[in-house]
Amino acid sequence: MNSIAVTADGRSDSNTVGSRDALDIHDHVDVSGYETIGEPFVDDPKMSARNVNVYYGDKQAIHNVSLDIGKNEVIAMIGPSGCGKSTFLRTFNRMNDIIPICRMEGNIYLDQEDIYGNVQDIVMLRARVGMVFQKPNPFPKSIYENVAYGPRIHGLAHTKADLDEIVEKSLRRASLFDEVKDVLDQPGTGLSGGQQQRLCIARAIAVSPEVILLDEPCSALDPIATARIEELIDELKERYTIAIVTQSMQQAARVSQRTAYFHLGKLVEVGATKQVFTMPKHELTENYITGRFG
């Protein structure tokens, strides 16, 4: 298989791609017959998915996916639109539960505990596994209250001084405090798009999560704001386990240590990010990276 590189300006570089015709995403794909190749499992996982199937009504969106997320790693999930990567990401904090027609089969473990078990407290689960969505969604409250809300309802602060400390620490970790320290009483919705997304990250951090799920967090942001978020991800991985869904192969290459490629609801390939982008083992992965579909 040919060596491939993803260039800084967003183009894929391959010694054969120029002569190839574009493919339709559905060409020569049978999702029933193959298994994930590469390295879907790790020695010390923070979260694990085993034999996960997800359905929307009668339509199957995820097909028998098994994958580990290692402690304090950033794993990127990539693939064409509609391939199931966001649906799969949401299984890690049971966010699909709010969709009436959605059902899930299989097991998801957080520190070897099945999060779909009968005794699982979903509110506490979502404190341990935080999520930041594609479009910034600050509460219609002040900047301060956006961050303070979670710690307050979870009983993490006993005094106003405790709460002030949590708010400041969370905003600092989200690289936002210096920009908003004099306007904490102003509405969070009045910030720029990039600042709003960092506020949402601070809000997630404030309840002391162990895992942060990022669902295309930069898709609505300009390049400068995107760069700030990517720098922040690099800093956060020292404290948190992070899984990011992204449509940008360049972003995946910049921020992640491992990459998982999804195609029509199947997990096709998982490996070290450099390997996946330069020497993919599966033809579908190569076709996607070289721009033949997606």
Image (tube, rainbow, N blue to C red):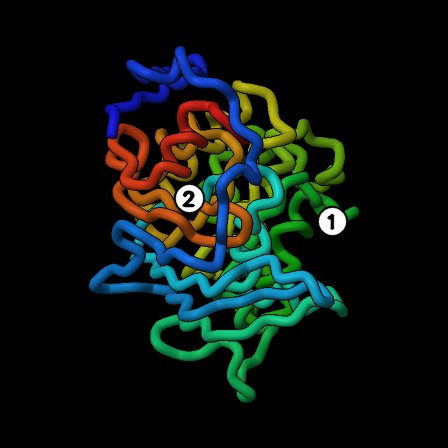
Which residue type carries mark 1?
A: Phe
User: Which disc is residue 261 wearing?
Assistant: 2
Q: Nearer the viewer, mark 2 or mark 1?
A: 2
Q: Determine the residue positioned at 53% across, 78% down.
A: 116
Q: From where the camera sits, is residue 120 visible?
A: yes
Q: Quadrant of the N terminus?
A: top left
Crowding at dot 1, Cα within 10 Å, few <14 / some 14-19 / many 20+, comes out as some
Which residue is depicted at the point 31% across and 49% down? 73
The disc at residue 139 is: 1
Name the quadrant containing residue 280.
top left
Q: Residues within 10 Å of mark 2 (few under 14, many from 20)?
A: many
The outermost residue toward the front is 28
CA distance for labels 2 and 1: 33 Å
Residue 168 appears anywhere in the view = no
Most distant residue in the right direction:
140
Split into 4 quadrants, where in the image is the C terminus? top right
